[in-house]
Amino acid sequence: MNKEYILVTGAAGFVGSAVANRLNSLGFNTITIDNLSTGEKEVIPSETLFIEGNLGEQNTINKLNDYTISAIFHIAGQSSGEISFENPSYDLQSNTESTLLLLKFAQENKIKHFIYASTMSVYGNQSVLPVVETTNPNPSSFYACGKLASENYLKIYTTLGINVVCLRLFNIYGPGQNMKNLKQGMLSIYLAQALNDSKIVVKGSVDRFRDFVYIDDVVEAFLKAYKYSETNSFGTFNICTNKPRYVYELLDNIKKNCDNLIDIEIIDGTPGDQFGIFGSNWKAKNELKWEPKVDFDEGVQKMISWAKNNI
Amino acid sequence: MNKEYILVTGAAGFVGSAVANRLNSLGFNTITIDNLSTGEKEVIPSETLFIEGNLGEQNTINKLNDYTISAIFHIAGQSSGEISFENPSYDLQSNTESTLLLLKFAQENKIKHFIYASTMSVYGNQSVLPVVETTNPNPSSFYACGKLASENYLKIYTTLGINVVCLRLFNIYGPGQNMKNLKQGMLSIYLAQALNDSKIVVKGSVDRFRDFVYIDDVVEAFLKAYKYSETNSFGTFNICTNKPRYVYELLDNIKKNCDNLIDIEIIDGTPGDQFGIFGSNWKAKNELKWEPKVDFDEGVQKMISWAKNNI
């Protein structure tokens, strides 16, 4: 019998590499596709088979035909709201066209499980918080539009025999986050600036707030989603902590944990940025049997310790 | 001063040609882009400048650089839910990528008005009817997903200086409908079958229902939307009649108005088809100052008379 693989797209990135690593450690064989546009080859776990290419192109997908794949964890994609404004078409290709092509591939190859890395950005600005999965989406960036479109496409494919779980990931942080990409990841951006320049440039108000979830908890959510997809045809889940954390809290935390004196400069926000959001994880707790384990202060400390050695 | 044009995409199609015609008769200069994939060259009004090409390709959009354009009526696109299942990627390119490229063109050329032909399909199956503009979309075809994504992209561009109106068009019918395309247009499909074959093949239950709106009323909605966009940055409107019409009513009406004896065969429905939908036009009446003028029975009679001479 052929060796079976789980396809983890984007394993050269922060979340993809962590998920692939964990799957490897559990004894699964993993294969990845990544275009190395923001990810790095060294980040891909050594046990993971690597195909380099753009998922928005059929030629890349065709390279998968040599392998037996039992599940898809689609994590690759342009992941910066800010960059989506610079090139909306690239964002569409990277985040939506890729999903469509992978779904077609999954259907043709009778792959039953499709776990999708969606985002809290689909909610946009909302007057009622915390957001729940039934909140009417109000995307305010091209990135969010493309992710929401992918969710909708995925839902249709459940009628075509694929079991789908969409994880709406909130602000993920933790060791392994890309400290060189200054357009993605609030905590990693601030930390990189603090450690490199002793100065943090905050784009937008310090009263903005987010729901921060630790990388290990996110990886666990992917595993629970995979399990969920064995017996359910569709689910969408907020992966979050139920707690708003303000930008000023984050800044205080960084200042407290760094040895150097850090200046703060506040400039205009980025287009399409959400002012404040946090989510309810009630549904994830009840249906996915997932809940976050790592406390915010503990997580930030771990992240800072790691960052000091990896800058 | 340069001659100013209104760009009406898809003027080789049913709605696009009717809108361009009307704009021409009001003294506007019009220009169109159409790839003639389902439209026909002879349908394009003779006064309308014609550029042949795919709107999902930058090369086509670049051909507009020779003209001064004051407004965009984006009507072109793959318009069959059924076909969107055959080729989801083509649907995405035709309906969503095209919108993004046109929006970028509009922004670069400071075009202030963008009127978009969206669809009632974005609602999908809903338990509460009639649908209103705040009903949470639930797209059930790739076609609907792509149109909804376009709406979301358009809304973001209102923050970048473009005034946008999205018209959620319900089932449009009337003289000029393409009688050769048997995958788009419920009334035109049934009529073509009745007149050509004396047999109507109904895909799905005769208890399904739709909200039918006459082509002249739809054209009027585009004009009102253009006017609305002079003083408003964004609006989404149902263009419908508030009245459900059942498939069996339609069949009875056709039988009554055709001279030949007509057989009815009922087969399985098409994927992603909505069972029943009708909309509220309250918002269009109040804000757009639009309401439908043509009664269903009168409209169907006009359509059948026209079809008999154009089959």
Image (tube, coloured by chain):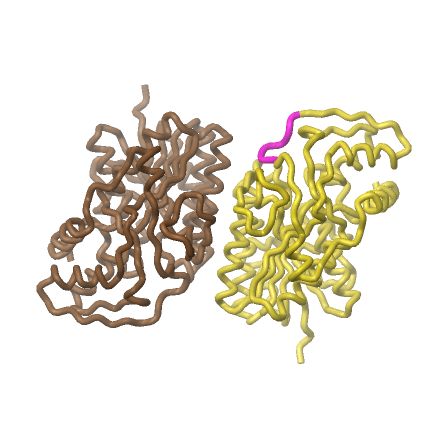
Chain colours: A yellow, B brown
In the figure, B18 relative to A221: above or below?
above
Residue at image coords 45%, 54%: B139
Query: Which of the 4 image quadrants contains residue B2?
Result: top left
The answer to whether residue B33 is visible is no
Residue at image coords 28%, 46%: B241
Percent coordinates x, y for residue A10 in the rendering:
67, 54
Q: Quadrant of the C terminus of chain A?
A: top right
- Residue B63 is left or right of residue B20, and the answer is right
Query: Is A270 within the magenta?
Result: yes
Q: Nearer the viewer, residue A53 or B294?
A: B294
Magenta-colored span: A268-273
- Residue B132 is left or right of residue B309, and the answer is right
In the figure, B35 relative to B193: above or below?
above
Q: Nearer the viewer, residue B78 or B2?
A: B78
Q: Main secondary structure of the magenta part?
A: loop
Percent coordinates x, y for residue A208 in the rendering:
68, 33
Percent coordinates x, y for residue B196 in the rendering:
16, 65
In the figure, B174 relative to A81: above or below?
below
- Residue A16 is left or right of residue B187, and the answer is right
In the figure, A44 relative to A258: above or below?
below
